[in-house]
Image: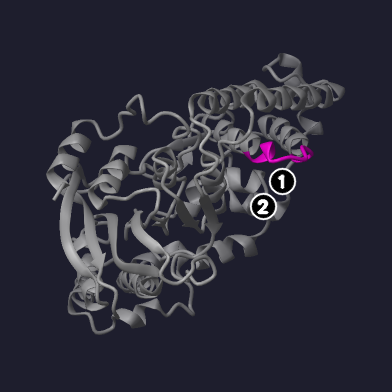
Amino acid sequence: MIGMKVSQRANGDANKIRADDRPVHEWYRFVLSYPPHLVRDYLDYFGTTYKDLVLDPFCGTGTTLVECKKSGIPSVGIEANPMAHLACTVKTDWVPDPASLYQSAQQIADEALSLLQIDGIEDEPMPNNLSCVAKCRDLSAELTKLILTDSISPLPLHKTLVLRDCIERLPCRQKKHLQLALAKAIVFSISNLHFGPEVGVGKKQSDCAVISAWLHEVRRIVDDLQMVEKSAAVPTIVHNGDARDLGAFLKPKSVDAVITSPPYPNEKDYTRTTRLESVILELIRSKADLQKLKRSLVRSNTRSVYKGDQDDLAVAGHPEIQRIAKAIEDRRLELGKTSGFERMYPRLTKLYFGGMHRHLAGLRQFLRPGAQLAYVVGDQASYLRVMIRTGQILGDLASSLGYEIIGIDLFRTRLATATKEQLREEVLVLRWPGKK
């Protein structure tokens, strides 16, 4: 097995970007993902070639698909979050001509600057800009309720909306690249967002340069497009959908390998992390859109649980999952925790593993006999500090569904935020023998 080699490399500096990792990989990140070299290691270990098809059913912003494309291996990804889907789509589209892309961006920048100047607003922060706040556009009341209060100030928001509309009028495939550049500028330059264990609001900036910040991110994309090989002939498809319902995206017995990192049972609301840019780019247009998105996700946090959820029924007879759920409830009672979300932790644990059971069960018909799978998962203690050995439990569920467990490789360790306990992040390696 390759687990020790992987864990040693990852633990050395899990966040360092190597020279061959940078192209197209830094365009947008909304969560800390696994490093590209981990994907390459498992592509090599599985013996994957250009004749195979690799699936990432929880593809996020595209780490697996980008590495497959760089290696000349066909791949398909499925991602429910529309912002991550946009990022993955752009990061695997290397066709746009870099010079043409930047020329289009400059034309859009000029148009946006002219529109702002009509209202007496400059892109760079100026004293006179603040006197124009009364003229600023705003989001609708419904959309404003979906984002964190004060996550973006009125003047930067106005400039961003003007720029967004100018980009929207661009009638070509370059549009998505320019939208992704705006998303990254919103998060890291334009907004008031602060990222810790959870996303929050940091220091408020009443004004900032929006168009120049966007052009900076466009330039980064352009630079990367100039570096990558034009591997347009390598098939890479990204679907926006639910990893528990694969029938709309895959052909039976078409997948040779799976390399993915599903959500962990950790009370992290992944839709919240990308909410501001998703709303501004109109990927989420209403509360109903947000609810639809949450329903399409494997349940890993209490904000995404709905009354009609039934995935927990699939693991009603699993003793370890039921033991963990009971231990969480016993701990809640012991600590006197009575909030609604804390009361939901036991059921949420069962919903998470039930959702993953549903995914693994549905996946079988799309795997070729002998298909190999790698699931990057992590131990968790988010629910009242009750330990959840995610990899072991998912391995047990997979085994009950007919998969062979090849091993559980240690990828890296990390400190739990609350307890400072060492938690394992692992790669569950499976094989599908070709029978149910």
Measuring from the top left, give residue 395's x and y in whole percent.
21, 67
Residue 352 visible = no
Of 420 and 149, nearer the camera is 420
Residue at image x 16%, y 52%? 409
Considering every residue shown, the one lying at the far right of the view is 118
Magenta highlight on residue 173: yes
User: Closer to the camera, 426 or 298?
Assistant: 426
Q: Relative to the observer, which residue lies in front, 74 or 37?
A: 74
Q: Residue 387: percent from the left, percent from the top?
A: 18, 61
| Quarter that holds the C terminus | bottom left
Q: Which residue is mark 1?
A: 139
Magenta-drawn stretch contains 312 = no
Q: Which residues are magenta?
A: 168-176
Q: Quadrant of residue 360?
A: bottom left
* 140 on left or right of 289: right
Who's the residue at 42% across and 38% down the image?
A: 70
Residue that numbered label 2 is attached to = 143
- Relative to residue 327, is residue 217 drawn left or right? right
Front residue (pair 163, 429): 429
Q: Residue drawn 55% across and 30% down? A: 204
At label 1, the amino acid type is: Leu
Q: Considering only vertical position in the picture, is 205 above or below 275?
A: above
State whether residue 292 is above or below residue 322. above
**Which quarter of the figure has residue 32?**
top left
Crowding around mark 2 (Cα neighbors within 10 Å: few <14, some 14 to 19, many 20+) is some
